[in-house]
Amino acid sequence: MKGVPGRTDHVVVVGAGLSGLACALHLLGAGRRVTLVERDGGPGGRAGRVDLGGYQVDTGPTVLTMPDLADEAFAAVGDSLYRRVELTALHPAYRAGFADGSSLDVHTDGEAMEEEVRRFAGPAEAAGYRGLREWLERLYRAQMRRFIDTNFDSPFQLLHPDLARLAALGGFGRLDGRIGRFLSDDRLRRVFSFQALYAGVAPARALAAYAVIAYMDTVAGVWFPKGGMHALPRAMADAAAEAGAELRWSAEVSTLERSAGRVRAVRLASGERIPCDAVVLTCELPTAYRLLGRRPRRPARLRHSPSAVVLHAGTDRTWPQLAHHTISFGAAWERTFDELTRTGELMSDPSLLITRPTTHDPGLAPPGGHLHYVLAPCPNTAVGPDTAAWRDLGPRYRDSLVAELERRGLDGFGDSVREELLVTPLDWTAQGHAAGSPFSVSHTFAQTGPFRPRNLVRGVENVVLAGCGTTPGVGVPTVLISGKLAAAR
């Protein structure tokens, strides 16, 4: 594995999101001196926190899978995630509701889920689920160490027996076709393929290898940290500080001082200069490239994942049909993905993720209050309405979302809202996300593994990248790995 040559005693990590915090903890564990600089007033990055009149809102991810990957970062400094954060395993992991009025609880326990599939769709589908679960487990084992948790220096690293194993498992076929071999019920197929959207690709075009995300969601388990998802970065920052990291909040980086092919110091907008031996940039790719004064040479422009509109609603009531995480599927499916990735229209029949964190932590809302997070995927600004269009479009779309939720059984939702925050591609763009998408560079084949933007930077020998735009990709588990991989460099 290629690494940073020369001295690396003092590393400045730019950005205290999950990748930056994981990187800092792994570096501290390897005996490096670490200064972590963050433009915001505290840790979290995308996994931030906003107080809306007493409702404590997670502004980023709401689903925690593979907590052992976070624990690995704590363990690097002799600490433990489980000592610092109280985690609850979610049963069910999700509830799925369908346009025909049926619903299914998604259990991560194999026997419980087989029983639920039998109730929902009959014995043949239950047997199909058993086969699918076994395939997902084998797929995960074939991919994790070799293709996800690894630093690529060349595409030739793919030439390994595990690649043949992955091919034999059908990993290079299409996701929806492969899942269709196990399940014929259209509703069940959606439950195990909607995760492709996290990777920014429609299930009909996604590699079957991306079913590994369905493994994380539906087999490995889903957890909820007491205090919300923001409790994770806050605990990581505390652990880093106790292990000796210097944490600098409200510290925006303006320039990198370079000479002889190395960054010698990081300069802050305040004018302060921080000398260093190496730098890890975990900011958005466009910001990282601007600081470096260069863009990598690629044969084609980077393509970005669809974006999302998020309505954070603090309400004075809730609805019993909601689980902690509820996926409300529209009747449309292929058309939905066409709208999101090709024609650039808003979903005409949306599929929505509704998260209610107060299910397991009522303290996130004032007494008698409930918190609902409604996520509606939408086209990014390169494919769909541009940033400026969202000024007028946002409030109108919010009203149509509320009407849709009421039509799907959450009657009185609009009247129950006491505090709210609407986030659209306009806001994501203002935060520095390319194409107005918080989900970064999509996982097409040409933007995956060794073909994804590399975490080493040509021409600057002591800068490493981390975060969802680089290796291995988008999502909480992969971003935590990206911090570890950057530290290893």
Image (cartoon, rainbow, N blue to C red):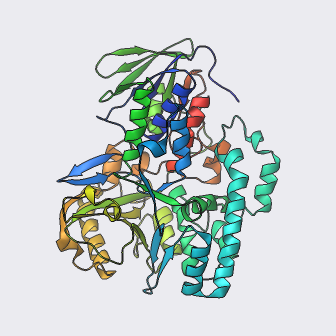
Q: Is residue 144 left or right of residue 348?
A: right
Residue 474 seen in render:
no
Q: Quadrant of the C terminus?
A: top right
Q: Is residue 308 above or below residue 188?
A: above
Question: Residue drawn 35% across and 52% down?
Answer: 228
Q: Quadrant of the N terminus?
A: top right
x and y percentages locating residue 62 in the rendered image: 40, 56
Residue 139's image quarter?
Answer: bottom right
Question: Residue drawn 71% across and 45% down?
Answer: 146
Question: Residue drawn 50% across and 23% down?
Answer: 279
Out of 217 and 173, give the one closest to the viewer.
217
Out of 374 and 372, give the one closest to the viewer.
372
Q: Residue furthest front?
A: 83
Residue 270 seen in render:
yes
x and y percentages locating residue 6 in the rendered image: 62, 14
Question: Residue drawn 58% across and 14% down?
Answer: 7
Residue 359's image quarter?
Answer: bottom left
Q: Is residue 380 left or right of residue 441?
A: left
Q: Residue furthest top?
A: 260
x and y percentages locating residue 166 in the rendered image: 76, 56
Q: Is residue 320 above or below residue 477?
A: below
Q: Is residue 68 left or right of residue 143?
A: left
x and y percentages locating residue 11 in the rendered image: 50, 21
Out of 136 and 382, give the one closest to the viewer.
136
Out of 361 and 19, give the one closest to the viewer.
361
Query: How many tags in the picture?
Result: 0
Q: Is residue 75 above or below residue 324?
A: above
